[in-house]
Image (tube, helix red, strand yellow):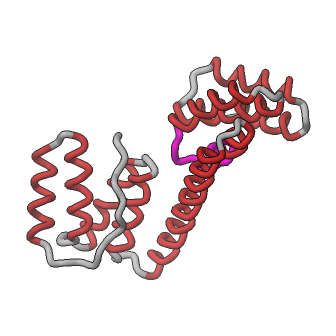
Amino acid sequence: EALLGMAKCERELGSDADARRWVEAALAGDVTPHQRAVALAELGRLLLNEGKTQEAVAALEQAVRLAPQESAIHYAMVAAMARAGQPERARYHHERMRQIRAQYERLTEIRRRLIDSPDNADLRCEAGAILLQQGFNSEGIGWLLTALKCDPEHRRTHEMLAEYYAELGDRQSAGRHRLLAAQSPESKPGPAIRPSRP
């Protein structure tokens, strides 16, 4: 984190050569997939500054694969795709960036509303759905499980858990949640969000 922070500072100060050394040091170390994504995104920005568009695109594409939920990486991709003469891909990444930011804003709103309504299973289910879509599977499942603590018959939560376990190949858990969903009272339509693969 410190190396990446130094790289960003150096880039913003216009010292791209120093920034690149910090990024390369970070990439050579033992980093998490998310840290690698952030480092690759920083490298992509530096390569764009150097006019190496294709290399920048390659680094940023790796970053997006590692951290598809990071709006800042999509923002960097917008600039790279525009410079590479690929306006449709630039528009795609701009839309993804906008969606991710809107979802984070919605999560903030949900957390605020849960202060006054901590037992609101609908809000907890929606938070879980957003987190699953963003690839935060353990956090998303955690929110769904808290929704069931508030309302054990929350149909949309059981449906989402059934989808999630089916994608994992856990047919027993998926079947149990499908059955519980079928036995639960009808609820208002929930967010049309498909969980990402773990």
Between 91 and 109, the one lying in front of the other is: 91
> Predominant secondary structure in magenta?
helix
- In this rendering, the answer to whether 135 lies above or below 15 is below
Q: Residue furthest right?
A: 14
Q: Residue furthest top?
A: 28
- In this rendering, the answer to whether 92 lies above or below 147 is above
Between 84 and 161, the one lying in front of the other is: 84
Between 186 and 110, the one lying in front of the other is: 186
Image coords of residue 65 (percent x, y): 51, 35
Q: Quadrant of residue 194?
A: bottom left
- In this rendering, the answer to whether 18 lies above or below 130 is above
Image coords of residue 108 (percent x, y): 54, 67
Q: Quadrant of residue 19?
A: top right
Q: Which contiguous range is marked in magenta?
A: 66-77
Assess whether residue 75 is covered by the magenta stretch: yes
Image coords of residue 179 (percent x, y): 9, 61
| Quadrant (top left/top right/bottom left/bottom right) for the N terminus | top right
